[in-house]
Image (cartoon, helix red, strand yellow):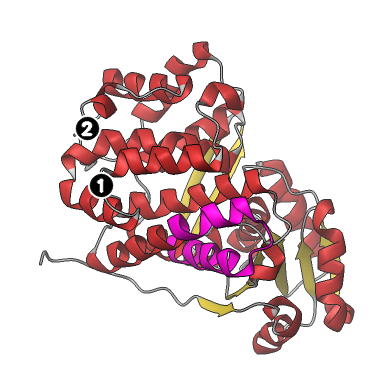
Amino acid sequence: MHDFEYQALPARAVFGAGAAHTRLSGEFDRLGATRILLVATERERPLVDELVAPFANRVVATFTGVRQHVPVAVAQQARELAASVGADAVLAVGGGSTTGTAKAIALTTGLPVVAVPTTYAGSEVTPLWGLTENGRKTTGTDPVVLPRAVVYDPELTLTLPADLSATSGLNAMAHCVEAFWAPRRNPISSLVAEEGIRALATGLPAVVACGDDLEARSEVLYGSYLAGVALAGAGTGLHHTICHVLGGAFDLPHAATHAVVLPHVLAFNAPGAPDAARRIGRALGGGDPVHALRALGTQLGIPRGLRELGMREDQIDEAVALVAATVPADNPVPVDAAALRGLLRAAWAGEPGTTEEEQP
């Protein structure tokens, strides 16, 4: 057993079918909140109006200007609204961008956040925040952005389309995989990550095959919760560095980018982290983890390459330069510009790279 440090975070999770309808009001009672700013997209409005009906008198304003990758201008608009109505708490109902917007409010105001995820982002139980400006995404860690409570209700994910369920679920799986070699990796986060991969790999095929399978939805939501916990404990590494650059610079869809890039980073790092590769493979059902992950992606209908998401081939070199400047020093396999170019070229084309071809 190697020496390690593990910081448990004060994240409260309430999990259960129907919990968003029956338990949400009580979470604001616990906070003593009476002036709630609601953050949600326009698409989620019918749902959120239903959820907040029992305490609608405490909702003083709604911010619907949520945008992917949380542009700085959007964050500022949300903060100004919170100040203008004298909000004393924030309720985020939606996916990762909605949670990210609520975190941006908390970052500068200190307001407590209650999150109700409707996708499998996992970010709702992490102290990580991200903001984008002028094509560059900046991320950081601050305990003030960690939601005070998260209400997980698998019923709210029943209408999430199959393609979004698949990419969102693999985005969560990326958190788990990365936890095995992220800078703060430790036995606790690795244990959580392995169980998260198992739950996601078990539930996702059933969710994509039958969207109203509540048991499968529950399994995937459970896995996404574990993914967030693993990410919060271990931090982020090469995979997230790449995806944050691609999202900020080229405005690629967040979850789909993670889903496409993940098997390429796994293939790149596996030779330098054999125990992690073994555990990831075990959680995926046995065998070679790269092949298992690729097979799962094919089964789920994941886009093959970044070019299918809108990235141009002539943008690869720009991405290489941006990623190279922020690659974690302790990545399991040394990373230089040539290696990055090969990895990103393979991810763009949707074809196995040299490293993957060498996998046993």
Q: Of the residues shown, which amino acid type is indicated by label 1?
A: Gly
Disc 1: CA contacts within 10 A as few (<14), some (14-19) or many (>=20): some
Q: CA distance from mark 1 to mark 2?
A: 11 Å
What percent of the width, then of the height, locates residue 11?
49, 75
Q: Please, what secondary structure does the residue beneath circle 1 have? A: loop
Is the residue 241 above or below the residue 142 in the image? above
Is 219 a magenta residue? yes
Given residues 114 and 13, the one toward you in this image is 13
Residue 51 visible in the snapshot: yes
Q: In percent of the image, x 29 and y 52: which residue is there?
A: 280
Q: Quadrant location of the C terminus? A: top left
Q: Residue furthest top?
A: 314
Element type where label 2 sits in the image: loop
- Which span is picked out in magenta? 200-227
Q: Is residue 102 magenta?
A: no
Residue 259 appears in the picture as rendered: no
Q: Quadrant of residue 196?
A: bottom left
Q: Residue at x 79, y 48 (%)?
A: 65
**Relative depth, front residue between 67 and 300:** 300
Query: Type of residue at label 2?
Result: Gln
| Residue that appears at 81% across and 67% down | 48
Name the image quarter holding residue 62.
Answer: bottom right
Name the residue tied to disc 2.
359
Residue 220 left/right relative to 353: right
Residue 94 in picture, x, y percent from top left = 70, 59
Q: Compared with residue 201, is residue 237 higher up or lower down, i.e. above or below?
A: above
The local crowd at label 2, few if under 14, some if 14 to 19, many if 20 or more residues have their Cα within 10 Å, is: some
